[in-house]
Amino acid sequence: MIYVDSSVALAKLLAEQRQPPDSFWDHDLASSRLLEYEVWTRVHARQLAYALGDQTDTLLKRIQFSELTPTVLARALAAFPVAVRTLDSLHLATVEYLRGFGQDVALASFDERMLAAAHALHIPIYEF
């Protein structure tokens, strides 16, 4: 399973220079429900909901979402081995939650701080 963070989803939607290949979206993808809010917030902030609304819906439907359970939220409140931003702590806590249930999860991200935190937590990184 590949855990998708917002940097990957937004790179695809916003047609950034660095984005995952089309075949990436055929994998078994997961993320926190938080991703849905992050993506739509950025789409709305750029006033692209009309232009990208259908594409955003299609992309998000390819991802299995985990809810922000009390267990995930409690982990996000705990210390991390490196400094993390708030939303990153929620994503990393979700990855750890999934791994705690025996899921083989690799993180897909273009965010260097997120990748550094994942490395410190011994979370496998998906290589593009």
Image (tube, rainbow, N blue to C red):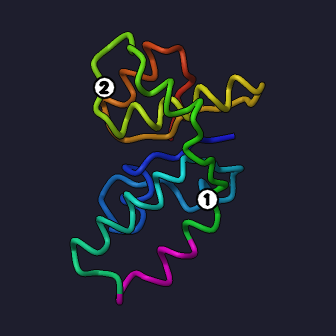
Residue type at numbered disc 2: Val
Of 67 and 44, the residue lying toward us: 67
Q: Quadrant of the N terminus?
A: top right
| CA neighbours of label 2 inside 10 A, class few (<14), some (14 to 19), many (20+) | some
Task: Say which quarter of the image contains residue 58.
Answer: bottom right
Residue type at numbered disc 1: Trp
Q: In the image, which is nearer the foreground, mark 1 or mark 2?
A: 2
Image point (32%, 72%), residue name: 43
Span shown in magenta: 50-58
Magenta residue check for 116:
no
Image point (67%, 54%), residue name: 64
102 over 80 or under it: above or below: below
Most distant residue in the bottom direction: 50
Image point (39%, 28%), residue name: 115
Most distant residue in the front direction: 70
Pinpoint residue 108: horizontal percent, then vertical percent.
50, 40
The residue pinned by badge 2 equals 84
Give the structural element (helix, strand or loop) at label 2. Answer: loop
Image point (28%, 75%), residue name: 44
